[in-house]
Amino acid sequence: MKPIAEAEATEASITLVIHSKADVTEAHRLLDTLTPPYTLRTTPPKASDELTARMHCAIRCVAKQVVWAGERLCEEDWKRLFVAAVYQQRVLPSPDGKGFVVLDKRTSRMNGQMKYDLTEYIYAFGAARGVVFDEESYTTEPEESSEYGHAGMDAGSQVSGL
């Protein structure tokens, strides 16, 4: 295990990535050499780039094949719906009093397990509606949204929902 310097770290700041018991032992050894005060912070691992790509691929497939509540939604709208379904949301009156604002969890702040659970939910949702998941779209960029926030849809069979 090699310490990794943090991007905005001071000279004394280090980050240790722990993958095994041997890494834990090394971390203990390092902590024993320090003179207090220090702050120790632990964080769960972030989702891998591959998992993030899988999640976006699954959302893209659903967006291309499912009509929801009579609408064809863009990928961003689908992502927000899925996040709200799995992790709930808060809805508050807008500051101008003319509607509501949905405050949801951001996928960029999810750890690996949370993003995995969300991706599994998307696959289950799609499978229940006959979505064919295309692994080739892993590497493609998300569709561009129109000015109204809805992406253009390919012609072909559409699966309806709701």
Image: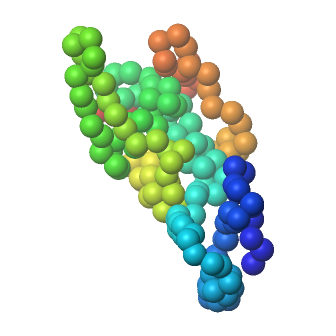
Above or below, 7 relative to 36: above
Q: Nearer the viewer, residue 19 or 65?
A: 19
Q: Where is residue 155? Give x, y as percent.
A: 57, 21
Residue 159: give x, y in percent of width and height. 42, 33
Q: Point out the image quarter for the C terminus.
A: top left
Instruction: Identify the colour scheme used.
Output: rainbow
Residue 14 seen from this side? yes
Q: Please tell me which residue is depicted at 38% across the width and 21% down the height of the picture.
A: 71
Q: Looking at the rendering, which quadrant does residue 94 occupy?
A: top left
Q: Position of residue 98 (x, y in %)?
A: 24, 11
User: In the depicted view, which residue is nearer to us: 3 or 37?
Assistant: 37
The total of numbered circles placed on residues is 0
Does residue 132 appear in the picture of this structure? no
Q: Residue at x 72, y 42 (%)?
A: 139
Looking at the picture, does residue 162 appear above or below residue 33? Answer: above
Q: Residue at x 66, y 71 (%)?
A: 17
Give the residue displayed 24% in from the left and 28% down from the top: 92
118 sits left or right of 1 in the view = left
Nearest the viewer among 77 and 46 is: 46
Q: In x, y percent, where is residue 147?
A: 53, 10
Quarter placement of the N terminus = bottom right
- For the view shown, which residue lies furthest in the right direction? 2
Where 81 falls versus 38 (above or below)? Answer: above
Q: Tell me if 9 is positioned left or right of 72 in this view.
A: right
